[in-house]
Amino acid sequence: MENLCQLCPHRCKVNRKISFGRCRAGIEMKICRIGAHFYEEPEISGTNGSGTVFFSGCSLNCEFCQNYQISKSYVGKTYTPADLAEEFKKIEQAGMHNINLVTPTHFSDKIRLALDIYRPSIPIVYNTSGYELPEVIERMNDYVDVYLTDFKYADNRTAYRFSGINDYFDYCLEATKTMVKSKPLVYKDGLLKQGVIIRHLILPGQLDNTYAVIDAYKKYFHPAAKLSVMSQFTPAYRSTIQRTLKPLENKLVINYLLKNGVDDCYVQELSSVGEQYVPPFQTD
């Protein structure tokens, strides 16, 4: 039945008109912030900022989520596809470099409707946890220019421990392959106009996971996609990891990248740690 949701790998088959899916969201789009964001990769944020649209809800259950105020609840302002199309116009007119759709998976069908109403001349960025169905990514390919996708874990055991998902690696790998195949890297004036950036957050005390993600990136995606290694882990929500990354851990990861010939990636500064980088959200 068309009302039974199958937009992410959970395939809840929930009628979101009457109940919530695993994403904690109903049928209506809830958005918690729209505005310029300057803390993405330089080729995304540029000088004028990335026009971010933060959706509420999430298909993962990460114990360390920094955006837990909106990812764990169905909060924010309700938007129709027509409303969202108007916001796209405003972002474009304000001179931001792109439309950055943050945690869009569970509203991807409505995002396509919004882009059918109005397609901006600036790139559309699909900013995702990486837990995606390849067939949904294929449906988004005609609408998305840039995939900004997480690659959190290189094995399902670690994924289950920290995000409550026992098949993350399998789906993330196949979905990322679909993204990279369809979107070769295209730059103009220092900005990414098309392509894939694969993000990985280093978890303190879990360097083997990071090394394995780098191995997977090198095997499947280098140099067709850009890697962005993030050092910003901050204990949040209900994290069982209660410390930030040590300088030695960061250095070991950098050395591993260089040892494996991955010297064309981003590595985040340790100064990026802190909740001050989490934007203010509208939760009512």
Image (cartoon, helix red, strand yellow):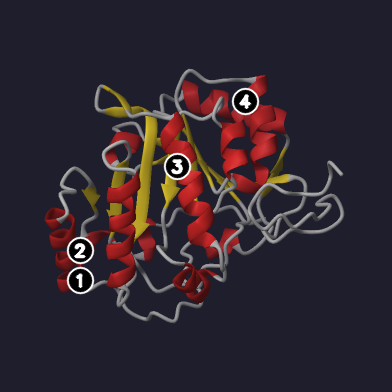
* Residues at discs 3 and 1 in contact (Cβ within 8 Å): no
Q: Residue 155's x, y, as percent?
A: 43, 66
Q: Give the residue number, with chain letter if any, for mark 2.
A: 253
Q: Give the residue number, with chain letter if any, for mark 4.
A: 115
Q: Amino acid at mark 4?
A: Leu
Q: Residue 54's x, y, as percent?
A: 55, 47
Q: Residue at x 33, y 43 (%)?
A: 221
- Spatial distance from mark 2 to mark 4, Cα to Cα? 39 Å
- Spatial distance from mark 1 to mark 2, Cα to Cα? 6 Å
Label 2 neighbour load within 10 Å: few <14, some 14-19, many 20+:
many
Q: Which quadrant would the N terminus be assigned to in this image?
A: top right
* Residues at discs 3 and 4 in contact (Cβ within 8 Å): no
Task: Choose mark 2 or mark 4, whichever is in front.
Answer: 2
Q: Is residue 202 visible?
A: no
Q: Residue 99's x, y, as percent?
A: 48, 32
Q: Give the residue number, with chain letter if any, for mark 3.
A: 177
